[in-house]
Image (spheres, rainbow, N blue to C red):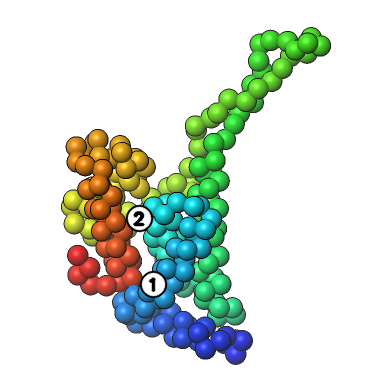
Amino acid sequence: MTDNLTEKGKRDLKLINRALEDGDSKAYNELMKLYRDPLYFMLYEKVGDQELAKDLTIESLGKAFKKLHLYTPSYAFSTWLYTVARNHCIDYLRKNKLPTISIDRMMLDEDGKRNTFDLISKDLNPEQEMEKKQRIAILRQIVNQLKPKYRDLVKLRYFKELSYDEIADSLDIPLGTVKAQLHRSREQLFKIMSGVKDAY
């Protein structure tokens, strides 16, 4: 089954086996080092926003590491990982595309027919609610390992989905501080996800 893998694919498979069989934190860390930047650039190309691309990279790696036991070496790990990230990105974009609901407008057009128009609905449908809960569950598993000041920021950003400005107002701290601390908290999240001990 592994004959079709390249040298790079075989290297990845060894790391995956070490991670799954031995719980080797260094193996997780190595996988993350290899793929964090390529994943980030792929996601950045899709969303065109650096901060959002970083968020989606964290979430995609979290999903992939959680589902690592589902990977099969019939194809390259990188292909599987990019698919997980791409699907996560599509889910995010679909969830954040404002849905519309059609209602009848109580007026007639020139021909005497009743018009319809669309109103923006901010309510999530059941599938979107499920996606949101899954996204939060992935992050919640690792967030509690952060330092308290970072933990609060991450919860406001990811669980309450506040903007940077809203977080700055809520905590009464400068916007630059919010951005800097969220950057540091992301680095810690990456380390925790890769199984590094004493990441903070």
- Tell me the quarter of the picture where residue 119 sits: top right
Alpha carbon distance from label 2 to label 1: 16 Å
| Label disc, if present, on residue 40 of the rendered structure | none
Q: Is residue 138 left or right of residue 126?
A: left
Q: Position of residue 165 (x, y in %)?
A: 31, 38
Q: Residue type at mark 2? A: Leu
Q: Position of residue 93 (x, y in %)?
A: 53, 48
**Residue that appears at 50% across and 69% down:** 81
- Tell me the quarter of the picture where residue 56 sits: bottom left
- Residue 99 visible to an observer of this rendering: yes
Q: Is residue 199 left or right of residue 159?
A: left
- Tell me the quarter of the picture where residue 167 sits: top left
Q: Position of residue 114 (x, y in %)?
A: 74, 14
- Front in this rendered view, residue 147 or 181: 181
- Front in this rendered view, residue 71 or 146: 146
Q: Secondary structure at mark 1?
A: helix
**Residue that appears at 50% across and 84% down:** 8
First of labels 2, 1 by sequence position: 1
Are dots 2 and 1 in contact, CB under 8 Å?
no
- Residue 65 visible to an observer of this rendering: no
Query: Is residue 61 placed above or below 162 in the rendered structure?
Result: below
| Label disc, if present, on residue 32 of the rendered structure | 1
For the N terminus, give its image quadrant: bottom right
Near mark 1 (Cα within 10 A), the count class, few <14, some 14-19 or many ≥20, is some
- Mark 2 or 1, which is nearer the eye? 1
Near mark 2 (Cα within 10 A), the count class, few <14, some 14-19 or many ≥20, is many
Q: Residue type at mark 1? A: Met
Q: Secondary structure at mark 2?
A: helix
**Residue that appears at 49% across and 59% down:** 43
**Residue that appears at 41% across and 82% down:** 15
Residue at the spot of label 2: 139
Query: Is residue 107 placed above or below 132 in the rendered structure?
Result: above
